[in-house]
Each structure stands twice: as C-alpha cells, then as structure tokens.
Image (tube, rainbow, N blue to C red):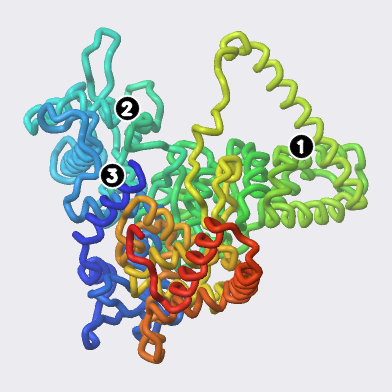
Amino acid sequence: MSFAIDNEVKDRVRLATSIVDLMSGYTELRRQGRNFVCVCPFHDDRRPSLQINPDRQIWKCWVCDIGGDVFSFVMKKESVSFPEALRMLADRAGITLEEPKNRAGRGGNDDKRALFEAMKWAVGQYHECLVKTNEGKPARKYLADRGITDSSIEKFRLGFAPESWSWLIDRGATQSWKADVLESIGLAARSERGSRYDRFRGRAIFPIHDVQARPIAVGGRILPGATSESAKYINCNETRLYHKSHQLYGLDLARDSIVKSRQAVVMEGYTDVIMAVQHGITNAVACCGTALGESQIRLLKRYCDSVVLLLDGDEAGQRRTSEILELFVTAQMDLRILTLPDGLDPCDFLQKHSGQELQERIAGSVDALEHKLRVVCKGFDPLLDTHRANIALEDVLQTMSRVSHSSLLSNEAMRLRQDQLISRLGRQFGIDQSEVRLRLDSMRKQSAERETQRQAFRSQQTSSSQNSIQGPTLGSRDSRPNALGSHNPSEQHVAPEPRVVRYSEMTATECELFEIMAIHPDLAPVAIERFPVSNLTTITAKSLFQVFLDLELEAHALDFASVMSAIEDPGLKSVLVSIEEHSAEKAKLSSMTPVERLHSLCERLSGHDDKSHRRQQIQSLEKKQFGEADEMSVLFDIVQQARARHGLFPPQGE
C-alpha cells in the first residue's frame, strides 16, 4: 500500500478501536476522573502507575516513562511488529485489510482467515475424537502411560486422528470445508493418482499454535504397537500459516512466564514441554522438528535475555554442538546448554526424578562455549596434549570464523562477545590471545576468499542471461526530501542505521517546536516551512520531523491522532505522547499565543543571520547599488521578512 492509503487504513483501525475496551482485556482498569488508571503490565507495579486518556486514545506509564496508542500497546504487550499489531486490531474490529482472492464458497484456499478457521475446526475435531469417542481410547491410554494428565490434554488441545484414509476429509465435506483447504493447511495430501487422503492417520495429535494462540499446524505421533512403518513423528508441511523454522511449540502458553523470568527453556519434543509444564516449568517450549535456529532465537529475543537449550542425552543431542556455538557467537543473548544424563529426554527424566531437580540442573547449565570446549576436549588435557588441543582449537575457531568481519564491524556487541571468547580460548589452551586472534582472522580471510571465488564463478555462469539487465536509474529512486532538506537520491538509497529514540534526548528547542506542532496542527505546515531544519540535532527530532514532513507532502491531516497513527515505531509514539503532555502544561503557563511562540522560536534560531543580511540589504539600497528591478525584489523580501518576524504570515497563494 502507498503511504497515503496506508495511513487511511491505520486511521480506520484506530477509530474502530476503543483504547479502554482494548486495555481492559489485559488488565483491570479503574476510572479516575475523565481518565482511567491501571497497574502497568510492563514492570512490577504495586500501585496503578499507567494512565489512559480515552479522549486522546493514548496511554502513559510514569514509572516506565513509556506511552503510546492502541498500536504500540499491542506491539509491546504481544511483542509483535506494527503490521502484525495492525492486523490483530483490524481482525478485532472486523475490518478486512485485504480482499480474499477466492470467494468461491466457504474456505477459499487463498483466504488466510478461512485457513485459520479451517485449522481451528480440524483441531477441534481431533480433540473431540480423543476425549469423547471409543476410537480415541488407544490414544488416551498412550498419553496416560506417558504421564500426561487430562488437564494437560485440555490445555494443549491434544487430539487423535483415527486410522482412516478420509476421516477428516469426510467430516469436512459435511461442514463445507473443502479438501482443497485441508490440503492447503497440511492436513490432507494427494496421491499419485490425484485423489486426496488424510495425512494424519492413527496418530496422537499435538496442535501447534502461534503466539496469538491460533492453531496453525499439527504434529502427529504414531501410537506404540502400530503396524505402520511410517515415521514415529510427522508434522504439517510448510503452509501459508506455518513455517517451522519460525515457530516454537508451546510459546503461546509459555510467553508470560518467559517474560517474567527473562529466560526460555527450549526442549526437543512435544511431550517434553507438556511434562515440563505439569512439573512447574512453565517457561518451556520446543522446536517444531528442527534444530534451534536464528529465526527462533530472534523470536525468543522479543521476550527474554537468556535461553537454556536442553539437549537429549543421546548421541544425536551431542552432535549439535558446533551449530549451537555459532548461534551463541551471533545471537547477542545468553545461550546456555544443559545435557541430561543417561541418554534421557526431559519427559523421561521428569518421570524418573522431579521438576525441582530439573530446575536445579537448568540453573547450573553452562554457556555454549563452555559446552563446546567440554565436548572437543573430552578425554584429554589441552595444556598437555598439544596435538589434540590444536585440533580442538581449530574446530572451535572454524565455527567462530563463520561470523563475517563486516558483521563484527557493524555490531559492537558482537565484537565484544568475540573478544570475550578469544580471551577464554587463550586461557583454556594456554595460548596468547594475540595468536588466537591471528589464527581466527586468517580463517575468516580464507573463508571470505572462498566465498568471493564462489560468487565469481556463479557470476560467470549467469553472465550471459544478465547482460540485458541494467541497474536502477537515479530517476527511479525516491526523491522525497528528508528531514535535513536533502533531495539527493543516492543519500536516500543508503540503508538507515538502527535508531533509538527518546524524549529525553531532544533539545529544549526541539521539544518546544514539537509541542507547538502537536497541539496546534494548523501551525504545523508553517513550522515545516519556516523552521531551520539544520537546528535539528538529535535522531529523535529528525525522525519525528520526517513524519510531519511526509504527511504534509501527501496532503494528509497533521492533527495529533493522525500523526500518532502514521508512526509505526513504538518508541517514537511514546515520544509523541510525552510531547503532547508537556505541551498542554506549557500552553497554560505561557503568556504568548501559539503563533507568537512559533514566531519567537524561529526568530531566535535564525534571527542573527537575518539581521546581518537585512542590514546589508538596507545599506545596499541606501547606496543605490541595485537596479530598479532588483531594488523592488529586495524591498519585497525585506517586507516579507518583517511580516514573518511579527507573525503576519502571508495568506495562502500570495
């Protein structure tokens, strides 16, 4: 969507969402005059410190010093991006953001909302089959033998798929759910002849939910004693709803506990998580049939600072050491490893021992480098057996070298982590840190050279098909001015650096400018025109000014609510809330009108240069240094400057 259309959609969703109704769904609100107060959900609040203004549709916590609107509240509470928050609120308000491509009956397989509904329906069918039918008895016995309680069956919505080729497809036909849709969500498959069949047959069903608790896929475990030779566990294939490398089983239930403890315990199996929750380990999640990857690490970073990866004690669990260390080097979070004894998985360990004992082991887990060193140095002393020590060190450094030099240059935290790792490796192997660093740099250089050679080879292979492709012309780039007044397309093309915006960062001048613009939108265009943008010195001010500038260029309204809707960064939303609050206080104390305040502000910033220039102009006029036409032009400029100094802005069109 374009900028203008995008803001129109944002406004529709904002206007359809009552901030009071929304926030009352998360916490108990208490009326206080025209406003509401509540206990802040973002810190350990013992008395209500979060205020909600229903008229302005904003909220503010005075302890956290953060605030915003309905979008930023959902973003922070649900740990989602702005587009996700927009969609969640649109769904809540019954607003369709995109027209489904297929309206041919219920459940068009291009309609994502219909796919969610179909998956929810199917999970309900599986669950009902498990808990209410004779067909589900074998599955109920299996789960009971594994120690899974009825309460967990309800909490995790476990189910059972009977041993039938078309049980779900047949039931779907009676409910107007087409086989096409069931295939689109991974529950049906197609034979070589083209006929469809149920993909999950004779299996206990473990629904997989997204962070919003919507079922998006299922995993199936074949029951013990089954004659089928198929795999013990299977999952849905990748669909529009489900991407396994981006999901974690049980995260919807564990999220609040993870946020509170700032730590997640990642296991490998569905039953591991279920059993952990039964034993009081409520921050447990599992990978969905994959090893822990970068996407899942990024997902967890929304909620916590530390991850404990609980590996099965078998040989397969130990083989993932190198992958884990690479994650540790690049993840910028505390990644710890726990290996269970005697080849046990967490479910078996909990049945043999207790939740308390597993909690103690989790507390004693080691970081990823220490785990790697224990594995590669197992069976020898690295300070005595230099040959094996050298092999082990090369193994560790080979993994570390996969982090590129450019990544380190652009990431200070990653550089610091590498320095810490090098220091520890030097101590472990009795080698000077400079030697370790030299070898690592050499490996990284060799790796970069090999990658360059591979790219050159690929380029040669594809050059014949690329000859006609031209790079983008300057004219094709966005030439919209930025907050510094630049129209240079090449400057616009540079990728922006990550921004951290704070109200406290802004200067007094910047605060006063935005205070005037926030509560007097009719003056915002004047401020955009007159304010010397070179006086914007902070990232926060430049970012906020750019929002006003973009809206003005698109002929969009510049009132507080519209600007708030246009902003997608929750930090910048919070800044605007702080500005709005301070502007109301200052407006009461100021003896000047808003126009006078803006005029005075611009005059203070550019007054010295104006006076000097004006003096020179008048002296030149007195000395008759201009021709008649130039003299009239200079006189006109002097009059216009005088009008501006006194707040007499020229009428539109003059």
Mark 2, residues whose alpha carbon is within 10 Å: few (<14), some, or many (≥20)?
few
Q: Residue at x 71, y 19 (%)?
A: 456
Q: Residue 254 carries which label?
A: none
Displayed quadrant of residue 466:
top right
Q: Residue at x 66, y 57 (%)?
A: 366
The residue identified by callout 3 is 215
The amino acid at mark 3 is Pro
Q: Which residue is drawn at 30% across and 48% down?
A: 144
Number of on-image labels: 3
Using residue 445 as the reference point, say whether residue 290 is left or right of it. Answer: left
Q: Which residue is drawn at 44% across and 79% down?
A: 646
Pointer 2 or 3: first along the chain: 3
Q: Which of 329 and 205 is in front in this view?
A: 329
Is residue 280 placed above or below 196 in the rendered structure?
A: below
The residue identified by callout 2 is 226
Q: Is mark 3 on a helix, strand or loop?
A: strand
Using residue 141 as the reference point, say whether residue 381 is left or right of it. Answer: right
Q: How far apart are marks 2 and 3 (CA)?
A: 27 Å
The residue identified by callout 1 is 398
